[in-house]
Amino acid sequence: MAAAIFLALVVQSITQFPQMVGDELDEATRERMQQREEMLSREMTRLLQELEQSTQEQSSFAWGALLFAALQQWQFWAIAGALVLLFGLCWWLRKRSREPDSSSDEESSSSDRVQVVEEEEEEEDNNDAYGLERFYDEHIRSPVKYLAPECREVTLWVHRFIRTFTELLAKTFFPVPQSAIGVGSAFEGWSPHEEDIVYRLLVPLEPPRGHVFHLELDNAREMPARNFHIRVELVCTCLNEQLAGEMLCFLHCPEEELRRNQNPGLLHTLCTGSYLDVQKTARWFQNLVERAWVRFHESYSYRLRVLPSSRSCKFQVINNNNKSLCIEMMFGVQQGDSDIFVSSQTRETIFTPSTMWPESYAVAEVKFFSHVTRRAPRNSFHLKCLQLCACILVRRGSSTYALKTAVMHLLTTIPPAHWHRRYFVLGLLYIMRYLRRCLEEKRLDHFFFGNENVPEEIILPPAFQTAEPLNLFQHLAQDPSAHANAMREFMELRDELPRLLRVPRDAFAGLIADGR
């Protein structure tokens, strides 16, 4: 711009001033030239001022451009920084949502807080479960989880036996076996044995044609449990049109004709006098099992070994890998349409005559544990508490029925949620406190007599509901040495549990004693 102004001044001087033609000028010309010079001087001053002002403006414009460029660069970095900050904030929030702390819980809704607590409890439960499963793997080599599939396999085997029995006994006058019912600890979901588990099933018997069963209560012995005799009676079949021509009436036909034309009746085969004999029935069952086995295709790939037993049919099914299942089939007669039977199973350490059938509550007990399992939380450890205590007692040769009865009482009085696996030690304390109190009072009531807490789905004879409770510890009150032995077994159980659980023994015993 300065060069343009300078060029404009040169052009203006050439075009506006005439060329001098001589040294001598008149006065008027010099005056005009002086005026012109003064005017040009003023114009030059003005132009120089404008040039200086223009230069200053141009310099200001240059600095403004520089500042504008710098401003544009600052905005770029500011935007870039904001984006980086935003990205970091999103990452922080995402991490925060995965690991919520107390402040985020306070700001969340109540449902979110519940979900966070449940997730934390689930993680804690998983950790606890891992430790407890490792504990069971270390101390109990046959965990509960392996019982269910083997129970199903055993049930299938016995079902096939019963179906074959029906074919073999179609035209005989022997008792008629019905569908077997799995009973005992294995079918209840626990086992006191670390190995060699025996799977027990009860086979109900119905009388054959021309016979009836009558149950007679034995009052000769004073004991907590009841015993029965099964009296076999003959009934007239003369007027039965469906049986006409198929069989002779045992009651009215001559004995010689019966012996000549008809198979022997039940009274002449499995009875002692007029009463069904347990031992004769057991031998008959064992013979049936061997006869049925030869009809099975699996007899070529499995082996059958009948085990000695005087009051049941016990046998092993062994595969080619020498893996075996020990199965015991007991038999009994149902009381009406209830879940109570008289069975061939004898009680521990008690001699039972061959015509005596103890009252069995095994079917009702299986139904009770099934009822509790349906109502219990998913991670309930009530069966494992029972199993752990039972395993310790069995190792010392002690009975587990009193322990099982105590746990059944507790399962109806303690809320199901309190048997959650996180309260495993507390569940053991419940059991130990209850046993201690029963031993001190020398009284443990039978679960099914006079107990209002029995679930309604369990069908009991009407007399059970109004009966006086049977005291399973009655013998302890009558025999001081038996009571002392029971207390010693309890102390051994009390001392063994904290050792296995790795908790202070004195503290554990103190909690049991004071009931805290």
Image: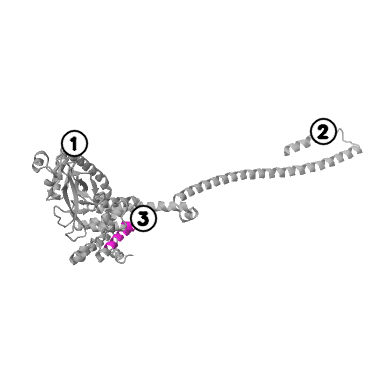
- Residue 294 appears in view: yes
Residue 417 is marked as: 3
Does 473 sit above or below residue 315? below
Q: Is residue 423 magenta?
A: yes
Q: Which residues are magenta?
A: 411-435
- Image quadrant in which the N terminus is located: top right
Q: Secondary structure at mark 3?
A: helix
* Amino acid type of the residue that numbered disc 1 sits on in the rendered structure: His
Magenta segment's dominant SS is helix
* Amino acid type of the residue that numbered disc 2 sits on in the rendered structure: Thr
Does 293 sit above or below residue 454? above
Q: Earlier in the sequence, mark 3 or mark 2?
A: 2
**Mark 3 residue crowding within 10 angstroms, few (<14) / some (14–19) / many (20+):** some
Q: Which is more toward the observer, 406 or 248?
A: 248
Q: Which is more toward the observer, 274 or 327?
A: 274
Q: Earlier in the sequence, mark 2 or mark 1?
A: 2
**Mark 1 residue crowding within 10 angstroms, few (<14) / some (14–19) / many (20+):** few
Does 33 sit above or below residue 204? above
Q: Which residue is mark 2?
A: 15
Point out residue 428 in the picture as x, y percentages from the top left corner. Answer: 30, 59
Residue 297 is marked as: 1
Residue 337 is marked as: none
Q: Secondary structure at mark 1?
A: helix
- Image quadrant in which the C terminus is located: bottom left
Q: Secondary structure at mark 2?
A: helix
CA–CA distance in space, label 3 to label 1: 48 Å
